[in-house]
Image (cartoon, rainbow, N blue to C red):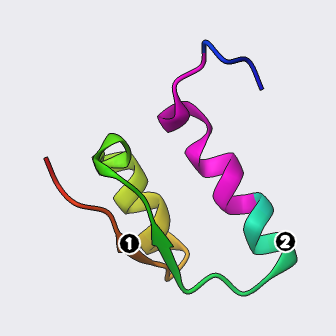
Amino acid sequence: MDEQVHDNKVFKGLVEKSCEKAKVKRVLADKAYDSYDNFEFLQSRSIDPAIPVR
């Protein structure tokens, strides 16, 4: 991963990779991951978001 890429851009890929290895029930992340797309993505996979809103 390029260090110039913001973490939020790779969020979905990280979650999908984790789901391949284990049953993901909740994702803990900091405020940088607070976006409508991320919350919607997690909801579509029945994953509880533990992300503080800004």
**Helix, strand or loop at mark 2:** helix
The answer for how far apart the CA atoms under marks 2 and 1 are is: 18 Å
**Residue lying at the far left of the rendered structure:** 54
What residue do we see at 13% from left, 46% from top? Answer: 54
Compared to residue 35, the image places residue 45 above or below, namely below
Count of marks placed on residues: 2
Q: Is residue 14 left or right of residue 54?
A: right
What residue do we see at 42% from left, 59% from top? Answer: 29
Q: Earlier in the sequence, mark 2 or mark 1?
A: 2
Residue 49: give its label. Answer: 1
Principal secondary structure, stretch drawn in magenta: helix
Residue 20: give its label. Answer: 2
Residue 50: x percent and y percent? 35, 72
What residue do we see at 41% from left, 52% from top? Answer: 38
Compared to residue 14, the image places residue 18 above or below, namely below
Residue 35: x percent and y percent? 30, 45
Amino acid type shown at disc 2: Glu
* Residue 45 in which image quadrant: bottom right
10 or 29: nearer the eye? 29
Amino acid type shown at disc 1: Pro
Quadrant of the rendering where the N terminus is positioned: top right
Residue 53 on the magenta segment:
no
Query: What range is drawn magenta here?
Result: 5-16
**Residue lying at the far top of the rendered structure:** 4
What residue do we see at 38% from left, 46% from top? Answer: 33
Q: Is residue 21 left or right of residue 44?
A: right
